[in-house]
Amino acid sequence: MATLKANLAQLYTPIYDSFMLASYAPLEQVHPKIYDVITDPTSEWKHDDVSGTGRWTTASEGSGGGYQDPVLGYPTTITPEKRWSKLAISFESIDQDEYALAKKIGESKEMGKGAKDDIETNTANFLTNGFTTASSPDGEFLFDTDHPKNREETGTTYDNLLAGAFSHDALEAAETQIAANYFDERGIPIPPSISPILLYPPALRGPVARVLDQRANERPTTTQRDINRFAGKYTPVEWQYLSAACGGSNTAWFILYPQLGFLKVVMNSQPHFTSWVDEDLEYINFKGRFLYDYGCINWRCGFGSTGV
């Protein structure tokens, strides 16, 4: 579809004093704070984990043995896909543009907003859909109650599905659950990252502030004079794209450990833009494109709650 005079007829009717292109400042991108964004030229990015050795065993003098085999994780394949947007503007729509507006439509920075919106939407929805979609490499929901310890010891499971609406008590219960379930493939406890990210939609801005704010020295919603030990412990990150208005949830919240690099965005090609002139059809063409995909290579990326 091209931008012809007939498509924007009002631009060519000189009855308005001015026209303004609907252009707004873009939101700050959040996904690079959550995902490990890498550039890789291969059509399929493949990953697998391999464990170290497990707990050491006792041995007697002069005895042999004691060897341990590494345990393989669950393989993951991320396949980047092409995303693009094109715009064609006829010579006439520029030559006879009463308000010189059509000349601005092709600005690549405006097309770039669509690219940012695409990757922000997809990476946010990956998390909110993680309660109902088997997107974990082990075949479970990303946030689930029964992640196998490893592919050989499937009888031992771990639970990274938190419960309840976000609150002081829910966060306290989450920490207890994390301590009981955050183990590696060999069953060795994983130390939680310093200052993990507490990710939430705008609807939870108030509850999160009341629990984490530096001035929240007392336990919220109670007359008890307990010290709020959560102040300054987490890095709160609000993400508009998690909200119900963007296809997500107004109640879901997450505790994530991006330092581990288990959430991935794989780029074959960064967003880039080009333009060319079709002298035969008399169009000026603009195109933006990039290739990427996203996913999770290990459920130990974090813990999440639907908030209900």
Image (cartoon, helix red, strand yellow):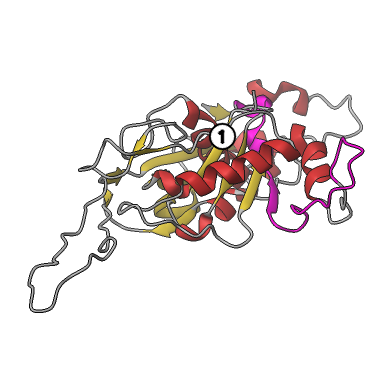
Q: Residue at x 79, y 37 (%)?
A: 207
By secondary structure, the bulk of the magenta-drawn segment is best described as loop
Q: How far from the left and from the top, in percent, is residue 54?
A: 27, 60
Where, quadrant-wise, is the C terminus in this rendering?
top right
From this viewpoint, is residue 285 visible?
no
Give the farthest residue toward the front: 60
Residue at image location 44% in from the left, 31% down from the top: 145
Q: Residue at x 53, y 54 (%)?
A: 257
Rendering coords of residue 100 (x, y %) = 76, 41
Q: Quadrant of residue 19?
A: top right
Side (left or right) of 275 relative to 306: left
Is residue 17 visible in the rendered structure shown here?
yes
Residue 234 lies in what quarter of the image?
bottom right
Q: Nearer the viewer, residue 177 or 121?
A: 177
Residue beneath disc 1: 162
> Is 205 included in the stretch rendered in magenta?
no
Q: Secondary structure at mark 1?
A: loop
As drawn, the residue found furthest toward the bottom would be 62
Residue 155 lies, in percent from the top left, at 27, 35
The image shows residue 188, relative to residue 254, as above or below, that is below
Camera-nearest residue between 269 and 161: 161
* Highlighted magenta segment, given as a residue range: 219-247
Verify whether residue 246 appears in magenta. yes
Of residues 204 and 28, the one nearer the viewer is: 204
Q: Is residue 103 left or right of residue 163?
A: right
Q: Residue at x 21, y 54 (%)?
A: 71
Q: Residues within 10 Å of mark 1 (few under 14, many from 20)?
A: many
The image position of residue 68, as x and y in percent, is: 16, 62
